[in-house]
Amino acid sequence: MQKLTLKAGIGMMVALGTAGSLALANDMRSETRLDIAPGGTINVLNSAGSVSLHSGSGHQVLVVATSHSIKIEIDQDTTPDKKRVEILTHAKPEQKPTTEEARVDFEIAVPAGISVIVNTATAPITVDGLSGEMISLSADTGQISVHNVSKAHVHIRSVAAPVTLSAISGGHVEITTAGGAVQLTNVSGPLVNVGTAGGNITFQGDLSGGGAYTLTTHSGAIDVTLPETASFDLSARSVSGAVQNDFPLQQKAHTSFVAKPGSSFTGTSLSGSCSVELQSFSGRIRVKKQ
Amino acid sequence: MNCHKFQEVLPYIIETGGDAEEEGHLQTCPHCAELVQDLKYIATQAKLLLPMHDPSPRVWTGIAQALHHQGTIPEGRTSLRGQIMSFPSQAKSWTPMGWALVAVFLMVFSLLLINYRPHLPESQSSAQNMSAQPVALESDDQQLMARVSQRAPDVRQAYEDSLREVNTYITDAQQAVDQDPEDAVAREQLLDAYQQKEMLYEMATARTLP
């Protein structure tokens, strides 16, 4: 019995090893350097797999691509004026790759000051440490994560992809998602605007530097966690959800709606240097102290 | 009298106040009372647009004939024409802007009457009792779904779920605006809901992902 078990175990290991080798054999890794002019834009279009962008140096975009099938082709090109780099994946003619075969994983090093536009379907998008004027990300279902970005306009659109932002400052942040949850940690700027139909919104930060924050959801919940020292002018309303607030607020003289206990509140904390609007239809809203 | 019958003779009621039976229904049905109030409000606002000018009888005659032709005014209900025709003619001249404003108002008013679907009391709902069930996909949405039919199954499902969610959002926000047109937050939410739908359409159609 013991011998039989041993043989079965060895057989499984051999089978797994063979399958792994075959999978690795199909993986194709390429490394490309593309010239880009200061202030230029990188445009990435990739359906499945992943797209990861991080800060690079010099005046070249370094693209490391890993594809998993010969049915997929990767086009990478620079315009003659070097203002724009195009990176896109597509099926080869007469080929119909499966979802798994269509996957391409990109690791892209982006020089300072370069804007990026990324569109994916299921591929998650990760952005870390970029400093271009604009970061525009769009995904159907692939998770979108942006970290350590300052003075860039961050525009995000998703169908159902969850969105996570952290350490973002100094630029406009606009997020529109139909079903994705949105999580913001230490996100500040002159304008932060989040709209979602069904997703929850979580905000944790200090609202430093003033600005206008608008978080709107239809059926999702809104959770806002702020330090006791945060200075803000707050209005919150949920049509049929509950609202909770831990901060002592000074009542405002004028409001855009009549506050009703339990479903809405308005008021000012400290000097009210930031404007915060929280709106939900059926989701609950909670503003709590850190 | 029920809501349906009441709303069939709404133009007559707006003009004359209705007969005793209609007046009685108006007293007991808050929904129809609200509708009449809204229509009277529109009519009042339209008058403010033209404080100095009344159209010639020819215009009112044309409207009455058009409403009769469409069947909006039942046979035998002539008060609209009667009321209208009894307006004294004015010697004041009409400016092109005046004509344009009247035309716009009449178009809006006619569309409101023609497209209005009676809401019977049992189906009445409010923003406080929002749609618990997702709203069905509209025909345009079906076309959108056909467009994303080649995408991965989970992506297709995400689009369908999102469209339903956004449609529900639009319905709820529209109800809130209807209940209180002065509610700035509700108007913002309606705009936000439509922007989300616009985004879904753009993402489904504008991109050429393989």
Image (cartoon, rainbow, N blue to C red):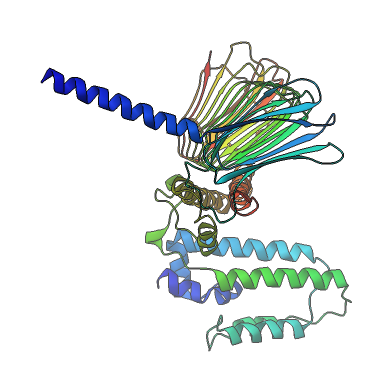
Instruction: Residue A2: tell me if it is visible.
Output: yes
Judged left or right of residue B81, residue A181 is left
Whole-percent x, y for residue A28 in the image: 56, 34
Which residue appears farthest toward the left when viewing the image? A1
In depth, the one of A61 and A21 nearer the eye is A21
User: For the N terminus of chain A, which image quadrant?
Assistant: top left
Residue at image point 57% right, 74% down: B114
Q: Tell me: A29 left or right of A12.
A: right
Q: What residue appears at the point 75 percent right and 40 percent down from the top-left corner?
A: A77
Residue A259 lies in quadrant: top right
Residue B22 locus on image (x, y percent) = 47, 72
User: Is residue B190 placed above or below B63 in the rendered structure?
Assistant: above
Viewer-closest of B97 and B13: B97
Establish if B149 lies above or below A52: below
Q: Is residue B7 left or right of residue B102?
A: left
Query: How many callouts does the rendering have?
Result: 0
Q: Is residue A284 at least partly visible in the picture? A: no
Which residue ends up furthest to the top in the rendered image?
Answer: A229
Residue B192 screen position, x and y as percent: 61, 45
- In the depicted structure, whether residue A202 falls above or below residue A177: above
Towards the viewer: A90 or A112: A90
| Residue found 24% across the figure and 23% down from its top | A9
> On screen, A154 above or below A72?
above
Q: Quadrant of residue A156 in the image? A: top right
Query: Looking at the image, which residue is at 64% across and 50% down?
Result: B207
- In the foreground, B162 or A29: A29
Residue B32 position within the rendered picture, expressed as x and y whole percent measured from the top left:
49, 64
